[in-house]
Amino acid sequence: VSAADHPIGLDRAAAYLLGELADADQDRVEAHYFGCPECARAVASIEALCAGIAAQIPPVVSAAAAARLRERFRLGETRIAPGGDADVYFTPEVDLLLHHLVADLTGVERVDVELFGPGGQPLITMFAVPFDPGAGAVFIACQRHFASFPSDIHFQVVAIGAGEQRRPLGRYLVRHHF
Amino acid sequence: MPTDALDDAELARGIAGGGAPELERELARRFAGRIRLYGLRHLRDRELAADLVQEVLLVVVVALRAGKVDDAALIDRFILGTCRNLASTWRRRERRRADLAGALAAEDELAAAPAAPALPDPMRLYGCLSGLPPRDLSVLILTFCEERSADEIGRGLGLTAGNVRVVRHRALAQVRQCLGAEAMPS
């Protein structure tokens, strides 16, 4: 066991698990944890944490992640145009609701999604959400445990440019029926 | 002497010659997690990683029984080398379980290698993630849920890849602390 490699810290372990280390460094990490039960346990614990995060369903997902959700869950999907509104129903037949907030994302590098309550009060801003410029929509993965939010939510999709310049792309009213 | 009091080299020597199933099980208990980690990193698939554990342990035990491991003191290196060889072969061609595996796994109970560590409770983890600053949460989501590289994330956030890694580290540390994970080197 090389003392220089001990202990394998959180940042190095995460970089290893994500495949970010150069080959030689990766080999050193592996040689170390194969001979060091303490570091093997530490790396395994970080792997479990990372896998747990990967298994979460974020409130906004990319088109690719939405496709993966379709394989795993029964989705109730609703397409909503900018300025439009929709009633969505969390019936026993669906596991998740997927709202397609239609927006022209061409050339956009960052998208924030702002949520407002029924009286227009700001609820939360979801910062730098996953999106695909070619998808033509931002996908909200609405989950049952969001029932604590107000039923009527106004979503606003905002493109963020250089210097944090905001360019609203659309506003959408969704009335949730849990 | 109880098997867990033996060091790795003593275990390896004890297995040589065969007829030591309790030592083989102890070897499996010690190394299954490390082999699994290797498999997760290089095969990117939990099921394949579990298969790799079984197959590597099998190859190693068969080699030890047959006296084909030259230096028992370097058993960890031998196991790592076996991981590399098998994973490399599996990456080059369609994975096909060796005929040997089914026959021997049933015989020597290596299939009873320890299970993978449990993932954090999803709702508790959700609560911890919700407590992160928005940018930190975004970095974790884009990294682990969307499998974006630090470079890709940095372009969207106006950060360097190095800064993304710093944010990621800080966020992971905060989530670990929130979950009450046992202290680990930082």
Image (spheres, rainbow, N blue to C red):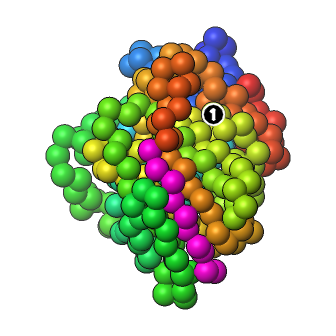
Residue labelled with disc 1: B135
The residue positioned 80% from the left and 45% from the top of the image is B178
Q: Give the camera-side residue of A178 and B65.
A: A178
| Magenta stretch: helix, strand or loop mostly | strand
In the image, the segment drawn in magenta is A169-178
Return the residue nearer the eye: B94 or A62. A62
Residue A2 is situated, as x and y percent measured from the top left of the image, at 61, 15
Please tell me in which quadrant of the rendered image residue B66 appears. Answer: top left
Q: Quadrant of the C terminus of chain B?
A: top right
Indicate yes or no whether the magenta region holds residue B167.
no
Q: Is residue B96 left or right of residue B6?
A: left
Does the rendering let one see residue B74?
no
Classify 10 Å Cα crowding around label 1: few (below 14), some (14-19), many (20 and above): some
Which residue is situated farthest in the bottom direction here? A92
Question: Residue under mark 1: which chain is it in?
Answer: B
Q: Secondary structure at mark 1?
A: helix
Q: Magenta stretch: residue A170 in it?
A: yes
Say which of A141 and B145 sits in front.
A141
Q: Residue at x 63, y 33 (%)?
A: B135
